[in-house]
Amino acid sequence: MMFGFTRAQAIGFVVMAAILAVAPFVAYPIFVMQVMCFALFAMGANLLMGYTGLLSLGQAAFFGMGGYVAGYMIQTMHASTEVGLILGGLTAAAIGVVFGWLAIRRQTIYFAMITLALAQLVYFFAVQDTGFTGGENGIQNIPRGNLFGSFSLHNDLQLYWLVFAVFIAGFLFVHRVIHSPFGQVVKAIRENESRAISLGYKVEQYKWVIFVLAAALGGIAGGLNALVVRIATLTDVGNATSGLVVLMVLVGGIGTVFGPLVGAAIVVAMQYYLASFSDWVTVIQGVIFIACVLAFRRGVAGEVASWLKLSL
Amino acid sequence: MLMILGKPAPLLFGQLLLGIINGSFYAMLSLGLAIIFGLLNVINFAHGALFMVGAFVTWGLLHYLGIGYWPAMVLAPVMVGAFGLGLERTLIRFTYKLDILYGLLLTFGLALVLQGLFTNAYGSSGVSYSAPDLLSGTLNLGFMYLPVYRGFVVAAAIIICVAVWFVIEKTSLGALLRASTENPALVQAFGVNVPRVIALTFAAGVALAGLAGVLAAPLYSVNPGMGTDLINTVFAVVVIGGMGSIGGAILTGFGLGIIQGFTEVYYPAASSVVVFAVMAVVLLARPAGLFGRAA
Amino acid sequence: MDLSRRNLLGGAAAGVAAASLPGARARAASAKKLKIAVISDFSGPYRDIGGPTSVACVEQAIADFGAKQKGYDVEVIRGDHQENPGVGTALARRFYDQGADLVIDVPNSAIGIAIEGVAHDKNRAYINTNSASSEITGKFCNAQTVHWTYDTYMLSHSTGGAIVKSGGKKWFFITADYAFGHLLHEQTAAVVKQMGGQVLGNINYPFPTTTDFSSYLIQAQASGADVLGLANAGKDTVNSIKQAHQFGLNKKMHIAGLLIFLNDVHGMGLEVAQGLTLTESFYWNLNDRTRAFMKRVKPRTPNNYPSMGQAGSYSGTLHFLKAVEAMNNMKDVKNGAAVVAQMKKMPTDDDAYGKAYIREDGRFMCDAYLFRVKSPSESKEPWDYYELLATTPAKEAFMPMAAEGCPLVKA
């Protein structure tokens, strides 16, 4: 099959695309757009966590910087929307090159901690360089700009199709990577690193490439999200966002193709709709974490897949 | 007046002392964390929340039952420890056989639940607790005035740290603990109830968080978020010291307290991030932390 | 006809009758239905200054307005912004899209300002009663937004000005390193200098991760200043004051908390808080009217007395409802700029804030009260914490419009 889809995945993909194409007319468009942005972000994190076996606790650095760069380019430099998004992705990728180079030599918890530490440095920069990031207030009222300098994105629906297109492209790209010979080596490294080394693979370079890809996806997702909510703030670059994306991957199903989208939908829905439970938001979130670990470790997509005896 | 790098020397002596005081806090908190990680291989993200519970229990003992600071120093850790025992039996123990990541996530969820419940019960602006009369007032050290209570905290923390380190590294009880976690099947064969040993170890680590909470109650605002603010720093301490190394956690706690103290004079805005900068540098130079065994 | 039957039957009976007549009920409801969204912090650090108590105050305003008797069906919805601007703006968009006529409260300036943009996009009314930034009615101002209660300029001028006047000339600041802290520090420092005082130093400390302030307190003490200005809020203020006591700083320096709420004083206790000077624009025990308001609202929030932000949510909601009534056209309520214009046209008058008005830029013009925190022995009843020292009239308390740079105001 194209892009290395199995039959079930191909059906799943069509269903997903169909749902997302109808969604803005049924559900609240901003909500669905945010779900897709975070799903893109989570797909990057899933590349690291699910397929490479590396837990990063600093992904927000890429998401946040992507948002800042896109917002700054479009608002202050009057760049066209796609230029802002691409520059956001490139900036994140560039940071990813440096952080990846530093972090990939370390394993498990040490890898997690070093990514956390590096992300804290980015956060510090964002707090201090208020000229660029707007400090605590963030970059406010980011204009959505025009695509290719001519198509207005002001309307929610117009923006929706851009987010939709980027998400689908990202989805297919990630899937293609996983199912390429390159992706096979990456999975081999996760399963048995020393064996991969003895077979002559330069393990660190593979990990590094994945790390940079995850960073770039995070940056593009952050840029898109900044357009959707029209602000870029410290929250996007902070620890909580790094934790959120890990949660999305886990709830959705670590190492599954559809997991990041499902996880993003659940977590963003929690933020949106639990907000009305006001006093109990934190408690409910905590209970969901605990339940996930104790009862649904494979995540929603993983549980459904094993129930259907399919690979999703 | 003697100046060092543009700052008066007495001020720097003061900072050194304050750094040691804060460091003793980091050491106390990271101690429990290091025990739980080193012996059980669980990354206890709820440690900060349990520290907060310790402080609230201290306040509650006085507020509801009229029980003062000194009895609380024993009662609160015991109560928090017992609570920890319950958590271990009902939740934590299911994560032992899983990837270490799941323990982290479970305890993170636990931290959210505890924080949320206390916010609902006691609000966000916190409750007040004062140091016992015996320990109030200040000492004139010549270069600064030191609150008596802070002096007491350092002394208490050093005694506790040394005692715990001694028990785990130098006694037969410590040897049993380490053996139970490194080779449970063998120890079980000797007739030791290994699950019970593990549960009690977790409870002991949590009790240390509770004890730190007792010490913190008169110092800081007792509010539901008090643990969250500290937990990242304390994690950094444990990682820099070498995950699982008790001695490493203690020494790093004091070391980081001092480094932070000087940062607060020369570049205050960076005094939080300096901890993470140190962590990044240390991990790049020594993959398993300063005193950890290489992975 | 519908209305007259309602009047005849009385409120409760009309409810029963209407329920049995779904068609009639729908007509009546769609005629005068209003929705007010309280977006606040319900689960985090600002819960006590906003949160459930703000909701209680909004509900009290609806009751005091006599919504039911006047035929309005006012629904209150609540959203927890979780201290996340992304969540806050998303909530505001969704609430407005679902028909909310007013968003109110919103502590945290970053979120407060972000929602200001949303209100403008959607052209719906927005009353911020709990953010500090004076830029809300400055460079971010718009026709849909009213800023109630207080701002950084008013806090710095009331507290800073009064202390310099009483002889506190040499200041040292401890500032939370974010937009709010910087604004508070800069505006207070400007007042101090303008009135002939001196600023001997300032420390920006990391926010929100700092719990120990001893190092900064020692530096403040070493500076030789006689006033310690705390340009921070919430638990940071509580921690810095509590620790200043431990080091005996309160005996050598005058401590000025630039933003302290009644709830913070409650949290730290009078033992520690006594002697502080601070500014609020509302205090429940200020006069007969505020006490009457407190008596009415207390059953709704027995354990947490409202401070100025929450009382602002009461006052703001009440004035919004009066404006809606005056417009007497439910269609125009969906036009936020028109509602706010109507609100600016009418003077305000309520038990919490007395008589006041809203300026062209959206600034609610109330007096600022300088308080001294009582000692434990002076406090006669629960939550009896303040003694009034001085009153700054609204015109002096807030930044002149010319200096603000609000695009709404024509030079």
Image (cartoon, rainbow, N blue to C red):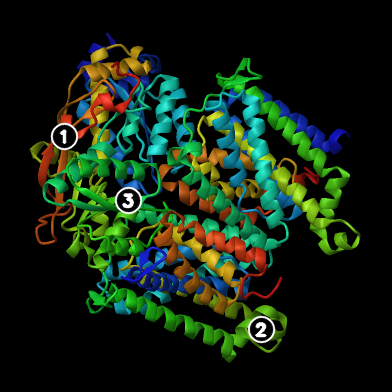
**Horizontal side, residue B10 vs residue B24: left or right:** left
User: Between B95 and C88, which is closer to the camera in this rendering?
Assistant: C88
**Horizontal side, residue C364 vs residue A208: left or right:** left
Q: How crowded is mark 3: few (under 14 residues within 10 Å), some or many (20 or more)?
A: many
> Residue at the spot x=27%, y=60% of the render?
C223
Picture disc at residue C367: 1
Residue B42 percent coordinates (x, y): 60, 68
Task: Give SS at disc 2.
Answer: helix
Question: For the C terminus of chain C, which image quadrant?
Answer: top left
Inter-mark Cα distance, 1 to 2: 70 Å
Q: Hey, which quadrant is residue A69 in on the image? A: top right
Residue C173 percent coordinates (x, y): 29, 52
Task: Give SS at disc 3.
Answer: helix
Q: Nearer the viewer, mark 1 or mark 2?
A: 1
Inter-mark Cα distance, 2 to 3: 47 Å
Residue B204 percent coordinates (x, y): 50, 77
Q: Which of marks 2 and 3 is in front?
A: 3
The residue under label 2 is which amino acid type? Answer: Ala
The residue under label 1 is which amino acid type? Answer: Asp
Q: Mark 2 points at which residue?
A: B179
Q: Mark 3 points at which residue?
A: C234
Farthest residue in the bottom direction? Answer: B172
Q: Residues within 10 Å of mark 2 (few under 14, many from 20)?
A: some
Inter-mark Cα distance, 1 to 3: 23 Å
